[in-house]
Each structure stands twice: as structure tokens, then as C-alpha cells.
Image (tube, helix red, strand yellow):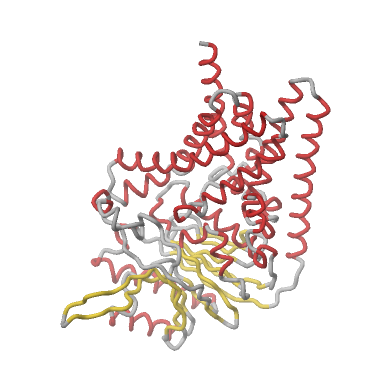
Amino acid sequence: MNHQKTVYKYLFLSALSAVIIQAAYPPLRLWPVGYVALMPFFYALLKNNNHRPSLTGLCFGWVFFFLNQFWIYHSLHYYGGMPSVSATSAVMVLSFYESLYLVVFSFMVSRLYKRGIPFIMFAPFFWTSLEFLRGHLLTGFPWSLMGYTQTGYLPELQISDITSIYGVSFLVVMVNAGLTEAVLLIKQGRYRKGLIRVLMVLMALSLSTGYGYYRINQIRNLSAEKTLSLSLIQGNIEQDVKWNPEYQEEVLDTYLKLTEEAVKEYHPELVVWPESALPFYYGSEPELTERLNNFVKEIKTPLLTGSMLVRGVEFKGNEVSDYRVTNSAILIDTNGKLTYIYDKIHLVPFGEYVPLRRFLFFFDKIVPVGIGDFTRGTSFVKGDVKGLRFCTVICFEAAFPELVRGFFTDGGDLIFNITNDGWFGRTTGPLQHFDIALVRAVEERKPLIRVANTGISAIVDQTGRVTKRLGLFKRAALSDNIEIKRIVSFYTKHGDIFSYICLI
């Protein structure tokens, strides 16, 4: 009976950790919580290492991921047409899969801790390597990383230009592990070793924070080599209207009117619209395509926008036999000509395509509104505006550090992130997505210009500071002049060396 009570106590502590850590993520962003919230879980894990430690990891992981990613329910239920039970079950299944990484973590660290190896010396390596694997296996889903608890405190994010976000995760876990171990050692009367753990934590935080302040001041004191004036158009088009043929003209008119007003008032060098802003297939619907091209010529300002494109159409007689649809970014120049096309490389599984469709043919029937069947892009295509080379990452792609890095291995100046977060509704989803995208600016040391259909649209400088933003569900234009300081980060040059070291 006592054994059973002990197990329940440790499971409770694990679940408590999973609840507390939510405060470090949006909307609260209480970043100091990130450094202590894992302590109940780690305490339970180390004290319970003889009684199914993997169960402790499963409990923490399942509760943590379910709470942190419950916004997925909103997308599946309200826009995917799934019944409440099915949508909740889907989130539970995803959370269970992600929690398996914590099961592996718990099993491995409990074995090493029993051998007398200091917890602080190996826990951060295992956690970081498993986060890295979760971001790559089965197409990858690098959401809810521990490093994102620090987006509310810019100095701690700066090490991302060396390690990517995974280095921030390493730091957060190291602090939690060191403090937990210090508590256990002090309770055992081993004060000297407990003090050593505390000093190790303080040293790690001091080095990271010191580097952060140094880099922030260094970069902000650099002179801009170039500038670019921009107008970002946040159309705030409702999801049930966006692709309704009855509202096609109204949706396009909304963007044209906002753009016309912004150009008249601010005279930008580039206008940017969100992902799939065009309520038609550019190039496949001649009248609307010509209308847009003529508009761009009239305002004498290039337009970067998201659009669905139909490619590779083949005919058999009068019948269309084959074609591809891509989720793309296009640039229309002041002559009304298409000068840049980027096709989204990392599609959203079960949203924009079904992985292994031959075997999962039944999945379309589960989701009443159907699933997209987009073709992924294959090239890291960069565009050029006013002599500045830029990349466009579309929606979910902003969550993948190595994908964004792929655009800059041969140079570049700007990151555009166009997205439609209307699917998330009034949940924490768009807030989390924004914080995730923000870190890419720090990793690459490139300004990030984010344009979202329903928000958050923003301009982020090379230290991760938000210089201007539009909130959620506002229909407006945001205009600003951004500075380009040409910096090549260690991460851009060398990639995921830090994560690979953790994996070894």
C-alpha cells in the first residue's frame, strides 16, 4: 500500500511540473518559471528510479504536450469538421507519441543516476538529443521545445546563434537538473556537493546571460549597411470566407484597398501579403491574375504574396490527366511580371498532404472537410528586392531551424515568414507560432518579417527584438523601415554541431 502511495505521489509531482511549465510559454511567458518548473518532475524521477521511472516520464510528457498543444483541437474541430471526441482523441494520440521521448529520457537517466553519475552532467544531453530527434523523425514536429520558455527574455536566446534553439533547451534543463540534484544532496547532508551543483548552475546562467548582453549590444551598435521600407498587409480574412467563391472579389478587394492606402501614405519599397492571401490560383485564373498584375503596376511597388499554384498540367484530349498544386510564395515586380517563385518544402502532415497515402487511404474519410494534396517544393529558392536577397518560409516551416538555415548557406539578407494562423482561432497556437518564428531571427542573425492573415504580423530585428507588430484579428497595414546588418552566425556556417554532440 505504501509503495502504491509513493508511486501516486511521484506521478502527481510529474503532472504538477507539466502544469506549472505552461506559465513559461505564451500567453504568460513567465520565463523564470522555465528554470524551476521541471524540478518536481526531476525530483520524482530521481527518487522513484527503482519503481518504473518510465511511467513518471510518460505522465509528465502526456500532460505537458496535451496542455501545450491543445490548440490543435480547435483546428481539427472547428475547421477540420472533426467531432469533439475525435479531435480530443487526436490530440491525445499526438501527445502520447511525443511523451514516448520522455519515457526514453526517464529510462536512460534513471539507469545512469543509479551508477552514481551526477544528474546535471547527463540529463541536458539526453533531453536535448531527444528534442532534436523529435524535430526530425516522422517528418518532425519541433513544437513545445524547452528553449521556447525563454522567448520572454532575449539575453538567454542569444546563444541560439551558436547552438540553435536546442542550446537554450540544454541550458533550461541543466539549471533544473542542477537545482534538483542540489536539493537532494543537501537533504542527504552532502552540503559541499549540493553547493557545487548550485555554483555550476550559476556559472552556466552567468555565461549565457553575459554572452547574450554582449551580442545584443554588439549587434545593435553596428551600422546598417542597407535599409528597406516595407508595408505588411494583415487582411484578417475569416477561414470560412477565405476560399468561398462568393467572397472571392471581396477578399481580393480587402487586400487591394489596404495596400493602396499603405502605399499612398508610406511609399514602401515592398508590399507583403500573407500565406495563400490570393483567393484564386495565380496564373490559372486569367482575369483575376491580370487584375492583380495591373494593380501592382499602378502602385509601382513590388508585391510578395502567398498563392496556391497549379503546375505541370497535362491533357489527354480535352481532359486534364495530371497536375500539381503547390503552396507557394511569389514576387510580382513593378512591370506586373512574376520574378520569383518558392514552393513550400516542408508541408504539414495530415493537413497539406497525407504521408504514405497508399496505406492511409482511409484518412480522408476521417476528416469531413478533406485534406490537401499539395506537392512539396525541392529547392531553397531565394528572391531579390532592391539588391537584398531574401528567403520566404511558409507557415509551419518557421519551426525548423535547419530548414531556414538551408537558405543562407550561400548568403542572404532577410527572412520573410508568411502564414495563415486563422486555423488556430483564439488559442495559444498563434502566440506559440510567433515565438517559434522569432527565434529564427536570432539563429541566423537576419531580420524576420512576419505577415500573418489574422496575426501576429511583426518585424523582428537580428537580436529577436520585436520592433513593430500587429495583434491578433486586426485588419490593418504595418509599415516600417528595416535595417540590414550583414552578419553570418556560427549556426549558419556550421549547422547543428551542438545537437550532434548531444546525440553522441
Image position of 138 (left or right of 204): left
Image side of residue 498 versus residue 238, left or right: right
Q: In the rendered image of this protein, does residue 384 appear above or below residue 399? A: below
Q: Is residue 258 at least partly visible in the picture? A: no
Q: Residue furthest top?
A: 1
Residue in the foreground of this view, choosing between 463 and 402? 402
Q: 96 or 288, which lies in front?
A: 96
Percent coordinates x, y for residue 398 in the rendering: 52, 60
Residue 164 screen position, x and y as percent: 63, 57
**Residue 189 position within the rendered picture, expressed as x and y whole percent measured from the top left:** 79, 20
Where does the image place residue 158, in percent across and percent down from the top left?
69, 56
At 73% from the left and 64% from the top, the residue drawn is 220
- Position above or below: 261 against 335: above
Determine if residue 80 is in view.
yes
**Residue at 55% over, 80% down:** 385
Would you identify the image quadrant in which residue 448 lies? Answer: bottom right
Viewer-side residue, 130 vs 88: 130
